[in-house]
Amino acid sequence: MTIVRTDKWLVDLYDKPLEICERIKFSQSDVSIEEIYDYLIMNGMYRPVRGGEEVVKKLRDNNVWKTVYMEEKKLKKEWDGPTIPIYIFPSDSKNSQISNEYNGKSGLAFKDKLFLFLSNKNTDNEIKALFTHEYNHICRLKKCKKKESDYTLGDTIILEGLAECAVKERFGEEYLAPYLRYYSETQLEEMWNTIIKRNASIKKSSKEHNRFLYGQKLLPKMIGYCVGYHLVNKLMTEQRASIKELLGFNTEEFIK
């Protein structure tokens, strides 16, 4: 089974997240457990709080691990996806952005593993939509053979755009990320032509990459994510293509 039974870990080790992190398989041998945990916290993983065990119990009672297992089985077949370990943990209740903007849920995808951080208020469809987004990343990374060191801003925004279009295809606009409601189609087209297009070749390793992705230093908020969704959705509509068909498209086919 690809779903790691982190619920069993949490029953015994909820108050010892560093010990939990020691059980997660990371290829970087030079990274400390503390650094791994800090990175996971930054992306939404829980920090122990009083009463947190009740959140774990609620997630177990709601059969969250089974729900994700069934979705993984379905999407693996649909998208010819890889088998990777999937880790599920409570989300950080102290993170106001995650709590207020994303209803207490967050996710994180690597090429060889996937994390879901959930609250006890997430519905089945919210969980399925989040998993759809993150597992779509895994499938895109499998199809796109480019080395991570060669990734550009263009590659990243298309990666994110594909994931949200996958959510829309499966669950409708209701489950799209809230930031995709920030701008009109006209605004997004203008942002693409005047801001993102000429910077699409910026390497992921550059500090400027995240500035254009998240919209930092006077740029529109989440501009890269929103423009990426706009470009993928536009091509998807024009070609009447499915997400499965688009997964293998080169970035250049979306941004030409």
Image (tube, rainbow, N blue to C red):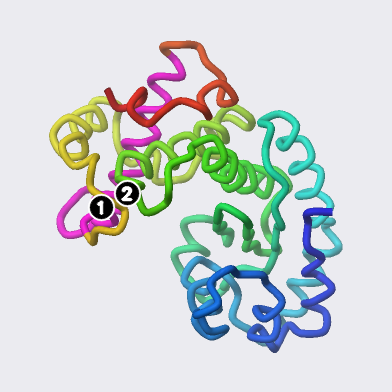
Q: Residues within 10 Å of mark 2 (few under 14, many from 20)?
A: some
In percent of the image, x 24 and y 25: which residue is there? 186
Q: Dots 2 and 1: beta carbons under 8 Å?
A: yes
Residue 221 locus on image (x, y percent):
28, 51
Q: Residues within 10 Å of mark 1 (few under 14, many from 20)?
A: some
- Compared with 161, 150 (above or below) is below
Q: Nearer the viewer, residue 42 or 250?
A: 250
- Compared with 158, 98 (above or below) is below
Q: Secondary structure at mark 2?
A: loop
The magenta span reads 208-237
Residue 209 magenta: yes
Task: Give amino acid for label 2.
Answer: Met
Q: How many marks?
A: 2
Q: Nearer the viewer, residue 232 or 61?
A: 232
Give the Cα distance between marks 2 and 1: 5 Å
In percent of the image, x 84 and y 54: which residue is there? 1
Task: Give amino acid for label 1.
Answer: Gly
In percent of the image, x 47 and y 71: which residue is there? 42
Residue 81 magenta: no
Q: Nearer the viewer, residue 26 or 199?
A: 26
Q: Which residue is mark 2?
A: 222
**Along the polypeptide, which appears first: circle 2 or circle 1?**
1
Q: Nearer the viewer, residue 202 or 132?
A: 202
Q: Which residue is mark 1?
A: 215
| Quadrant for the C terminus in the image | top left
- Compared with 24, 65 (above or below) is above
Residue 190, by quadrant, is top left
Residue 10 locus on image (x, y percent):
77, 77
Question: In the visual, does 152 lie left or right of 108?
Answer: left
